[in-house]
Image (cartoon, rainbow, N blue to C red):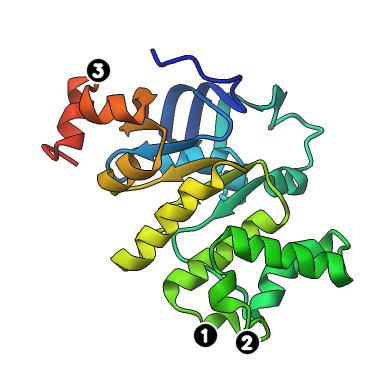
Amino acid sequence: MHSVMDKPIIQISDLDFWYGESQALFGVNVAIGPHRTTALIGPSGCGKSTLLRCLNRMNELIEQTRMTGQITMNGHDINAPDVDVIELRKRVGMVFQKSNPFPKSIFENVAYGLRIQGLKGAELEGRVERSLRKSALWDEAKDRLQESALQLSGGQQQRLCIARTIAVEPEVVLMDEPCSALDPTATSKIEELIQDLKQFYTIVIVTHNMQQAARCSDYTAFFYLGKLIEFDETTKIFTNPGHKQTEDYITGRFG
């Protein structure tokens, strides 16, 4: 079905998911390779964000949801009874559609998770700087670290949220339409950033923007009505999809 990749970091097997009586995902099987960007595309309400939130168990915060099937990370079942969910969410970080900086300084936003881990002093400062550099925000923020994060522009706030997510050194970074609220300039900065970050992390991004998926992902999964229709290398999905449904969506015939 798709080219051989390294041993997958995340393996999703026979995943079904329900909100109350309503089934949102049907029998999803997909393997996500390390140090790749995988884009989840498809029309609104097709299950992309639901799948994303299954990967760090965020759906558990919603009442009356249930899941069957299995998700493993590095071979371990993330839903096993002994899994520490807080630890899981450190390893599988999440960047939301709307940037959500804390009403604190730029520095304290990035330091937040590190302080919880007990870092302080020079080690803390070094990690904050490294995270801001990795998220391409250091040059714009280094003289303003004590200013409120809420004074940053929308695009800067989103990069700050990426810095906060990567500061605790996750293995996987989930992004739920990270550019949908941003202007084209800020969007292209985030896209460049995604290209840079995959050398350190495995990235899974939900996007409505076909061009964005084509530009910044290595693999693409196309969902329709809760089913995974096609999963392949992005270049193949966009140039020679195996399903007419995928082709119709990508060429804008529906969606």
Quadrant, the C terminus: top left
- Residue at 37 percent of width and 24 percent of height: 231
Residue pointed to by mark 2: 147
Residue 13: x, y in percent?
Answer: 54, 20
- The local secondary structure at tag 2 comes to loop
The answer for how far apart the CA atoms under marks 1 and 2 are is: 7 Å
| Amino acid found under the numbered disc labelled 2 | Glu
- At label 3, which amino acid type do we have? Gly
Give the quarter of the image for residue 118: bottom right
Q: Report whether residue 45 is seen.
A: no
Residue tagged 3: 242
Q: Quadrant of residue 60?
A: top right
Residue at position x 62%, y 49% in the image: 93
Report the number of discs: 3
- Residue position marked by numbered label 1 in the rendering: 151
Q: Residue at image x 30%, y 29%?
A: 235
**x 40%, y 39%: residue:** 217
Contact (CB < 8 A) between labels 1 and 2? yes
Q: Are marks 3 and 1 in contact (CB under 8 Å)?
A: no
Q: Earlier in the sequence, mark 3 or mark 2?
A: 2
Q: Earlier in the sequence, mark 3 or mark 1?
A: 1
